[in-house]
Image: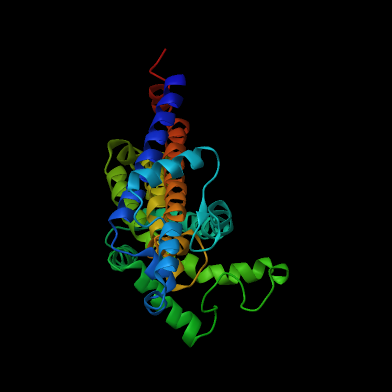
Amino acid sequence: MTRFILEHIGRFVLLMIAVAVLTFTLVSLSPVDPVQANVGQAALLGMSEEKRAALEAYWGVGTPMHERFFSWAADFLRGDWGTSLRYNMPVADVVASRALNSLALMGVAWLVSGVLGFALGVAAALRQGSLLDRFVKGYCFVLAASPTFWVGLLLLMVFSVWLGWFPLGFSVPVGKSAADVTFLDALHHMALPAITLSLVGVANIALHTREKAVDVMGSPYFRFARARGLTAGQAMARHGLRNLALPALTLQFSQIAEIFGGSVLVEEVFSYPGLGQAAVTAGLGGDVALLAAIALVSAALVFAGNLTANLLYGLVDPRMRRSQGGGEQ
């Protein structure tokens, strides 16, 4: 167990270093001029040389990448995440204010897509060749090939513009103070973005679960259970679901990275103030401190999801628990 913990701590540290270096490298190679992107071309042309030099120094233009990186890393290790030049406030405050919205959105979408995708996959496998099976496969193929932002735009036009069932965007009603916003208000604004992420996320889980369930139904122990008089549903419930648990866990926790990537597009479509929207704003404005913080937070979430899956494997299959602990004693 000590070796298991140390290995994952080492992997986590290496992951954080790699993400930070990659973020700073990509921002340095980007053709975006942060001064022009945040001031505007017209204002920049009429600006004095002294003022422009001061803004370039403020945004770190011309400073070598390695100097900016080591300066930022030293402050980050001391607990100072820096100041967001785009939002003009501490990066930690920006991330904290946006993380709650994003985590709520991604959490709902992750749970709904996992449960619904698993149920649809098992149901389709139990009724191979039926109308239900063809419907599930058709739905999954169409949604798997559909861009997330396109699905979001389609739902926005139908349910917000035409039917008026949901708001056009934002996480709270426009013009309403934070103290007056109720839980139902927040849920109403989050519903359509969460539905968009859930619909897209269901496709891969349902297709993979169906294929695994078909393999289980062709196994000797499943056929033996059927020969004993159990129906297909009873045999799946008693003997098949446990063998589907490991691939289902792998798929479910691997969805965290995909859902986070999809949330960036969904938050832009619905103007939902989350980490994804802040990441786009930081990238377009050259706000490297904010972009690096969001990248590290997202990488930590994905790493935590994979680690949780590894730990849950041991609960489902004791053989994997012994292998994680260094082998059978």
Q: Decide if residue 157 is on the left or right side of residue 220.
A: right
Q: Position of residue 90 (x, y in %)?
A: 56, 54
Determine the residue located farthest toward the right in the rendered image: 179
Determine the residue located farthest toward the top in the rendered image: 329
Q: Above or below — where is 72 with respect to 189?
A: above
Q: Above or below — where is 205 with respect to 270?
A: above
Q: How many tags in the picture?
A: 0
Quadrant of the frame with the C terminus: top left
Q: Nearer the viewer, residue 178 or 57?
A: 57
Q: Position of residue 289 (x, y in %)?
A: 45, 52
Q: Decide if residue 220 is on the left or right side of residue 112.
A: left
Q: Nearer the viewer, residue 319 or 25?
A: 25
Q: Position of residue 154 (x, y in %)?
A: 39, 78
Q: Nearer the viewer, residue 236 or 107?
A: 107
Q: Position of residue 227 (x, y in %)?
A: 33, 40
Residue located 43% across and 66% down the image: 50
Q: Above or below — where is 69 with respect to 280?
A: above
Visible in this render: residue 13?
A: yes
Determine the residue located farthest toward the bottom in the rendered image: 162
Residue located 46% across and 33% down the image: 311
